[in-house]
Structures are given as C-alpha cells and as structure tokens.
Amino acid sequence: MPNFIIKTHQKDTAYKGNQIFILNKGMNSGKPQKEPFTNSFVIICPDEKYAETVYWLAYSLWKSNFWHQFLIGSVIPFLRINDFKKDFEFKVNEMMQEHELHQKQV
C-alpha cells in the first residue's frame, strides 16, 4: 500500500517534507520534477528515500508515455486527478512488488 498523498498543487503553497510535482497539462503530462510546475499535482512522501523512489517510478511512466492514454481535452490535453491517483497508486504498487521480488531472487 503506498504511503504518499496526492493533491492538486496550489500556487504559493509551502510544503514541508519530501515532495515531487507532476505536470498535469499538455503533452508532457505526467512529467515529474522536484520544483513545482504551474499546473501540477503534488505527491507528498514520508521520507527522502521513498520520495526518490517515487520520483524515478513517475519518471519511467512519463518517459514511456503511459499517461497519454488518459489525456482528455481537444485543445490543451490534461490529466484528471482521479485518473492519476488511481493508476499511479496501482503502478507504484506493482513496480514496488516487482522490485522486492527481484531483490529476494538476487
């Protein structure tokens, strides 16, 4: 079970702790970054190591164009937060389980 919180980023909001930002508008939707985008979701993680892991999982999903199937809008495509939450949590669980299984086998 993932232990992070996904919210819509509000301009001028200061977050404590470890977080990453995910772009939610345009053809680069799903792109992670450590600094906030204007149109983004924020993923708040409990510690720095977990935030780094989530960042690289989000990066791999973005690089593989995973989020393109969820884009809506005819002029400026965007991701809905509910679609992002549901599918991101599922993919993170799946990838973490595969990683743990790989570590056990090695």
Image (cartoon, grey):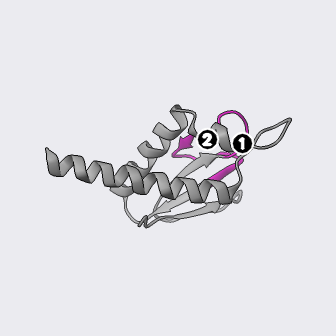
Tell me the element at label 2: helix
User: Is residue 31 covered in magenta?
Assistant: yes
* Residue interval drawn in magenta: 24-41
Q: Which residue is mark 2?
A: 67
Residue at 44 percent across and 53 percent down: it is 92
Q: Name the outermost residue toward the left.
A: 106
Q: Residues within 10 Å of mark 1 (few under 14, many from 20)?
A: some
Q: Residues within 10 Å of mark 2 (few under 14, many from 20)?
A: many
Residue at 54 percent across and 37 percent down: it is 62
Residue type, mark 1 in image: Leu
Question: In this view of the protein, which residue sits in the foreground, 78 or 43?
Answer: 78
Q: Position of residue 80 (x, y in %)?
A: 71, 53
User: Is residue 38 covered in magenta?
Assistant: yes
Dividing the picture into quarters, in which one does residue 106 lie? top left
Dividing the picture into quarters, in which one does residue 93 lie? bottom left
Locate residue 66 relative to residue 27 in the image: left or right: left
The numbered disc on residue 46 is none
Residue 14 visible at all: no
Residue at 51 percent across and 46 percent down: it is 34
Assess whether mark 2 and mark 1 are in contact (beta carbons under 8 angstroms). yes
Residue type, mark 2 in image: Trp
Q: Position of residue 91 (x, y in %)?
A: 47, 51
In the picture, the quarter occupied by the N terminus is bottom left
Alpha carbon separation for disc pair 1 and 2: 7 Å
Q: Position of residue 101 (x, y in %)?
A: 24, 51
Q: Which residue is mark 1?
A: 71
Q: Position of residue 76 (x, y in %)?
A: 81, 37
Residue 95 sits above or below residue 12 on the image: above
User: What is the total number of numbered labels drawn onto the structure image?
Assistant: 2
